[in-house]
Amino acid sequence: MATFQALFYLIAIVLLVIAALPLGSRRTRGLSLAALAAAFALTAFAAPTIEAAF
């Protein structure tokens, strides 16, 4: 379980760093990279609760 949590936190950090880079105009339809990173971080944070439920 710790590996799952660490992997999701690592993905969240990488996505936040990419989202912070000034790369011209990033017009996205749907989720932004920052929102996707937040989703990964919240999933990693809730991993012990998710595991306890199953």
Image (cartoon, rainbow, N blue to C red):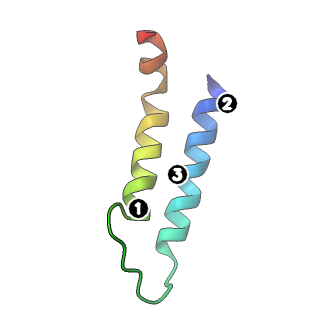
Amino acid carrying mark 3 in the image: Ala
Marks 1 and 2: in contact by CB < 8 Å?
Answer: no
Residue 15, given in percent of the width and then of the height, sits at: 53, 60
- The residue nearer to you, when weighing 53 against 13, is 53
Mark 3 surroundings within 10 Å by alpha-carbon count, few (fewer than 14), some (14 through 19), many (20 or more):
many
Spot the residue most to the right. 3
Choose the circle earlier in sequence order: 2 or 3: 2
Which residue corresponds to mark 2? Answer: 3
Amino acid carrying mark 1 in the image: Ala
* Quarter of the rendering occupied by the N terminus: top right
Identify the residue at horizontal 48%, vertical 26% (top origin): 47
Mark 1 surroundings within 10 Å by alpha-carbon count, few (fewer than 14), some (14 through 19), many (20 or more):
some
Residue 16, given in percent of the width and then of the height, sits at: 49, 62
Mark 2 surroundings within 10 Å by alpha-carbon count, few (fewer than 14), some (14 through 19), many (20 or more):
few
Q: Secondary structure at mark 2?
A: helix
Amino acid carrying mark 2 in the image: Thr
Give the spatial CA distance, label 2 vs label 1.
22 Å
Spot the residue most to the front. 29
Residue 45 against residue 23 in the figure, above or below: above
Q: Which mark is residue 12?
A: 3
Q: Secondary structure at mark 3?
A: helix
Residue 14, given in percent of the width and then of the height, sits at: 59, 59
